[in-house]
Image: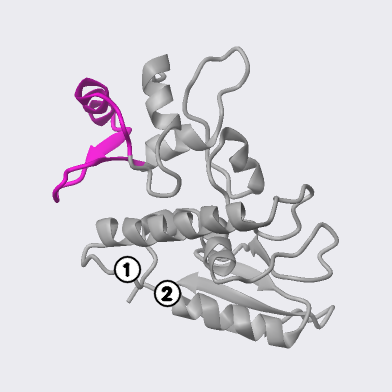
Amino acid sequence: MSRPPTAAQRRVIDDAEPVTGRLRGTPAQLAALVKRGLAFRHPRPPHDHFLTPAGHRIREAPPEPGSGPGPVPATDTPAAADSGVFAARVGGEAEAVPAGPARTREVHSAWQGLLELRRMTNPDGAADRPCGWERTHLVRAAALALEAAGHRPAGPDATEGYRVRATPQPEAVAVSAPDDGTLAACAATLEKAGWQTGAHTEPRTRVRYLLASPRRR
């Protein structure tokens, strides 16, 4: 197994910008992270450094007590926010996320960062199509698109607002809402954000929901 990052390297990783993973550190620190496969240097000016998927996994999950810092598998649940990483509201969170201007600014900043990540990592530089990070964080990516567009997430009782959940299908999430109008609005938002959606009905409960997948072209 590879050695865990040093305390100084872990601080650089933890301080990376939300969503984009843009890093700030000394040239020596950044070079060391690149050498270990935890960061990469962007080929276009200004040649900033960003976390690789392995670097994101380290940042998104705090180390177990007493084990020292090290990589832990990433998660698509709100618990990923425990390490200080921005997490969009997927709906049904047990603890309410504070609303207001500060949250609005945070969501807007995260969405703009995600668009920049698309421009930097999609081969053609397209910002209207989901990138690799979104395909490995489907629930959080879809929830961010919805929250950034002003949709209201469901509370713990799930009686109003959207909910985004993982599904057994590859590259697909389920989006539910309390009425067809809200569901249609969520579909329009996701399609504008580069997702493809389809409306379905649960056979037993007759509940309507969306299946949403990141568009590839």
- Frontmost residue, 97 versus 177: 97
Residue type (three-letter) at the residue carrying disc 2: Gly
> What is the quadrant of the N terminus in the image?
top left
Residue 123 lies in quadrant: bottom left
Residue under numbered circle 1: 127
* Left or right for 123, reference 116: left
- Magenta stretch bounds: 23-52
Q: Which is closer to the viewer, label 2 or label 1? A: 1
* Left or right for 40, reference 13: left
Mark 2 surroundings within 10 Å by alpha-carbon count, few (fewer than 14), some (14 through 19), many (20 or more): many
> What is the quadrant of the C terminus in the image?
bottom left
Mark 1 surroundings within 10 Å by alpha-carbon count, few (fewer than 14), some (14 through 19), many (20 or more): some
User: Looking at the picture, how far across and down is residue 173, in whole percent?
Assistant: 59, 66
Is residue 178 placed above or below 86 in the rendered structure?
below
Distance between the alpha carbons at the discs numbered 2 and 1:
9 Å
Q: Residue at x 85, y 61 (%)?
A: 157
Residue under numbered circle 2: 194
Is disc 2 placed on a helix, strand or loop? loop
The dot on residue 78 is none
The reply to whether the magenta stretch includes residue 124 is no
The reply to whether the magenta stretch includes residue 35 is yes
Closer to the chain start, of discs 2 and 1, is 1
